[in-house]
Image (cartoon, rainbow, N blue to C red):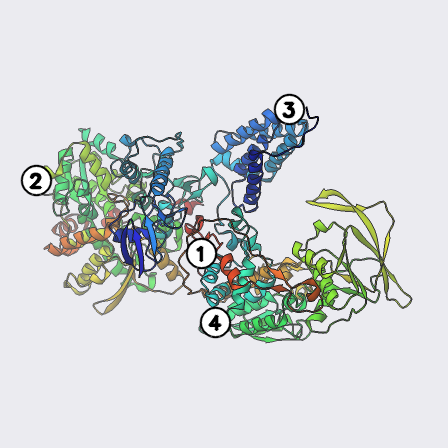
Amino acid sequence: MVNVTIDGVKLAVPERTTILDAAKMAGIQIPTLCYWEGLNEIGACRVCVVEVEGFERLFTACNNTVDEGMVIRTNSKKARTARRNNVELILSQHNSNCATCVRSGNCALQQISTDLGIQSIPFEKQIPEVTGNPDFPLIRDASKCIKCMRCVQVCDKIQDSHVWDVINTGSRVTVDVAHAYRLEDSDCALCGQCITHCPVGALKERDDTQRVLDAIDDPEKIVLVQIAPAIRTSWGEYFGLTPDVATVQLLGTALRRVGVNYVFDTDFSADLTIMEEGSEFLDKVAHAKDHKFPMFTSCCPGWVRYVKAHFPQFVDQLSSAKSPQQMFGAVAKSYYADILGVDPKKIFSVSIMPCLAKKHECAIDVMNDACGDPDVDVVMTTREVVRLIRAAQVRPGDLTAEPLDMPLGIGSGAGNIFGATGGVMEAALRSAYFLMTGKNPEPDAFQTVRGMDGWKESTFDLAGTPVRVAVVHGLANAGALLRKLDAGEVEYDFVEVMACPGGCVGGGGQPICDGAFKAADRAPVLYAQDKADTLRFCHENPSIQAIYRDYLGEPLSHKSHHLLHTDHHAWQMPAEKR
Amino acid sequence: MSRLRLFTTNQAQQTVEELYKDIERRIQAAQPGLCPVDLAATFLHISHSQSCGKCVPCRIGLGQLEQLIDSVLNGSATLETLDVIERTAESIYASADCAIGSEAARMVLKGLKGFRDDYEEHILHGRCKALQTQPVPCVYQCPAQVDIPGYISLVHEGRYADAVNLIRKDNPLPATCGLICEHPCEVRCRRTLVDDPINIRGLKRFAVEHEGEIPTPEIAEKTGKKVAVVGGGPSGLSAAYYLSMMGHDVMVYEQRKKLGGMLRYGIPSYRLPREILDHEIEGLMKSGFKAVTDVSIGKDITMAELKEQYDAIYVAIGAHTGRKIGIEGEDAKGVLSAVEMLRAIGDEEMPDFSGLDCVVIGGGNVAMDVARSAVRLGAKTVTIAYRRRKADMTALVEEVEGAVADGCEIMELHAPLRIEKDADGNVAAIWVQPQIVGPVEWGRPKPVDADVPEVRIPCDRVLVAIGQGIDSNTFGQYGIPVKRGRIDAMDTSSIGDVDGIFSGGDCVTGPATVIRAIAAGKVAAGNIDEYLGYHHEIKSNIELPRIRFDDHKPCGRVNMKERPAAERRHDFKLMECGMTEEEAKQESGRCLHCDHFGYGIFKGGRVAKW
């Protein structure tokens, strides 16, 4: 322990504590801007500077540690002046048109500037003009970038994708795409983690809400919406509603108020995914000699983009099953169009996802198996659906939740946990056990694959067959696993990968909460819902049983293959074209 | 009224003079990887501020040029802009009245040629090709990438053994390097911005002197793989050390009587005492490799046999043959090559130069070693004859000054013509042609014969130190590609299509420095390990001290002192004095910790393992 005095408060803190943390222990909040605990502790913005007795110069609190007897002043004239000056300098190169900024009200720079009472700046504004391609799902607005480097760090360290880097030197330093000139030519997985780590509005998703409104306004269109599992853990955050209130049903109700015709649950197609992917896995195990293992899950389009760009040798080991989103789209414009008795081309299929890569996925030109039109027309992130509801002046807190539409509005608890790391694996194992033994396992028998460890592994006994599984989330963990597989250092039968840390609950399309890892709070919501559900097995979902009985036949049938499976070689990542 | 007045400097001018010094130091410490176009614009801006404004090309032209280059940087230029820049710069160069304008324009023209692709990258893609890849200047200037800020912080805390062990992660010869490294790490030290570079080599030496016993390194599980290292010099020994740590069985084959290579047979012991070298080699051998000496590849054992017996071979034979001047009389008795002389000294067969007049030919570090050794061997006079100016010598300035202090005479601008023999074929004198310094070619002024008569320097010995060659014939015959005597290996130490044979050090680069040889050994060890199918990691578990705060108040650099010339010139004992603890503490406290402060904390600040 070392003794320190911070703003007159004397306390003892463990050695090597940062000044920032020591101040927190003393009940003193030092403002930060570029800092992100454990990820970006580089002292770039110089906002957290403090004065240390005995030194003329100031030191950053975020990445410097205390020493015995240190006397620190966090808000002395010198510290205060430098802090304010540095924020003013940042503002001089920041497009501060807050009123039209997507991050207004949720912006770390706006917050610090307001907190410091800055109402004008003494510097000439120098705003760069370059802005990213407005048609790509991920857009960088150079006029707002404050070079905090968080995007570079998350892309390097957490996502192993190395898309963003520091470009140029001296006064022209900026962040831009490395190894390519345009984002669309890079190996970006579209995980969107750079957006959720951006303190300002420099990185954002392409906003597709207007396309949804146009469809709603078109009397010829039947607008139906599917809602991904992870949305129900987070969409209420903006409205101050907790997940027990902000349910999927309440979101559906709000969307009906906005003008959507039918509201369904992607949990349904998550169940369908398990039927197809689980059957595919068991079929491969039965013919093990003809297949390479492990088989990888394919639900996460960020992961699919990553593996195609960086490890093409593993692409053939991806499950051929489409993601739940695309399965839903294909079913909506075939099976459900038949139920409604309408031309599938009249259906406008909207998907609400915590994800940016889904925006790319729905636009892949082979994802049109139902009727020739895209199976999913528009993907909105959680943030966009919140904006859609707000723009319609709908106040979800004032609504009473109504049930979702049927038959595609029902999913099992197993489908529900798809939204968290380990969930796909657990759901698959529950049904695989049933398919192999004819009886259901204990629903929680496979819970060792849950949790926020980056790389989890287990071996389960399925009717005498040991199945070695691994679950990774965060693409750096995926990359590490693939490298070990390549080197022959690990062996598995079945591997689940989710690109975002924590899985979809931590997705790049989720509400942004500066500096916090929200996935760890959101995942338990899904598990609690699963626990409370009476329907905990995908194969027991009555709507799943009905669609196989009435339409598809059986898993892996010809029709299932046509609608629910895809060829991962049918399109290329930029790296595959090079 | 006074008719004349003395020029005095006012306070503004004095301050500007100080700022010039600041800028000089700033340029000296500039990190590589900066945008050259941005720098070109900046240099132009400085140049323009020096314009007196009398003449059009300089007063207006330099400003317009700067605007044009700025337009390139700001993305508003086209490829045609480059033509305008070129034409304008050429006109300014040709028509400016004085050098302030013409030299500024010449710099722009030089840049247009030298980094035209950077200009084009800015115009076509709005960005620069330059990349900031060297955040910690000392680490990246060190060929072996030693964790310098790390060990300096350990020295500051008095943790000397930890400091040296941290060095050993990347450089297993810290004692040697503490004494004789050319310390490229100091060249761009960021402390130069404040006052002077840190005395990094001195701190290394201090740490080694206070290390205590050399520990036995941790050895990985035995792999059963066998590696032969040909050459027991710094490169071979470094490779052998790391490969042994990785669990491979290593045998070093050394042609001479003892290990050490040029450290023993090229560096005089007054710079690197034999007991220190022997101790260091003993320490290295704790890693478990074996060595045989007095074995010549091609004579005692063939490459084919080695290839048969080992899974991989590292060829690090150094550059040990003396170059000849190629003048009449060079076959006279008493003409010795530097290599021959230093080799004999290495085996402790000291030549007796008592009462003899010696002339050394050459101006490099080896020439100084030979001259200063000759003094110590009792020579009556030692004259260093060099065809260029003293200022053009490639030897380190301190070596030249040291030689002079030891009593050597430098005859600059004297080119050797012929050696005169006496009746018995012994050296009687060397004839030299006085030179006049001439036009600059390839960055160095070329000496030209002066219009004055030849000079006869009577002497008993001529010591030739004009470079070394590589004895690579055996390896070339075996099928290893050799280019102009050098083994043609890549920067990974591997050799084109030759499977399982690696090479590095002086035999690849030509005569260079000990730290480059060590780095080659390290690179070879890593790549041989990979070739053998492993991925062993060399790392250090030493926890570094808390980063100190500092106000960067200017403070002089602790320079190394030497024993008085009058004393040291009579013996081969270590010439340089080490730092005191007080000095080491102060000097280590000057480190700015670029691994933590600046770009280093963001990217590339610390390479914890390799």
Q: Quadrant of the N terminus of chain B?
A: top right
Check disc 1 and report the residue beneath it.
B606
Q: CA distance from mark 3 to mark 4?
A: 69 Å
Check disc 3 and report the residue beneath it.
B55
Q: Are marks 1 and 3 on the same chain?
A: yes
Check disc 4 and report the residue beneath it.
B217
Q: Name the front one of labels 1 and 2.
A: 1
Q: Chain of mark 2?
A: A
Q: Is residue A73 above or below residue B366?
A: above
**How dense is the environment of label 3, judged by Cα within 10 Å: few (below 14), some, or many (20 and up)?**
some
Q: Is residue A230 above or below residue B574?
A: above
Q: CA distance from mark 2 to mark 4?
A: 71 Å
Check disc 2 and report the residue beneath it.
A400
Q: Are marks 2 and 4 in contact (CB under 8 Å)?
A: no
Displayed quadrant of residue B484: bottom right
Nearer-the-camera pick, B465 or A62: A62
Q: Name the front one of labels 2 and 4.
A: 4
Q: CA distance from mark 1 to mark 2?
A: 57 Å
Q: CA distance from mark 4 to mark 1?
A: 21 Å
> Residue at image x 74%, y 65%?
B375
Q: Are marks 1 and 2 on the same chain?
A: no
Q: Specify the amino acid type for callout 2.
A: Thr
Instruction: Tell me the SS state at disc 3.
Output: loop
Q: CA distance from mark 1 to mark 3?
A: 52 Å
Q: Are marks 4 and 1 on the same chain?
A: yes
User: Is residue A300 left or right of B573 when viewed as pictured?
Assistant: left
N-term mark: 4 or 1: 4
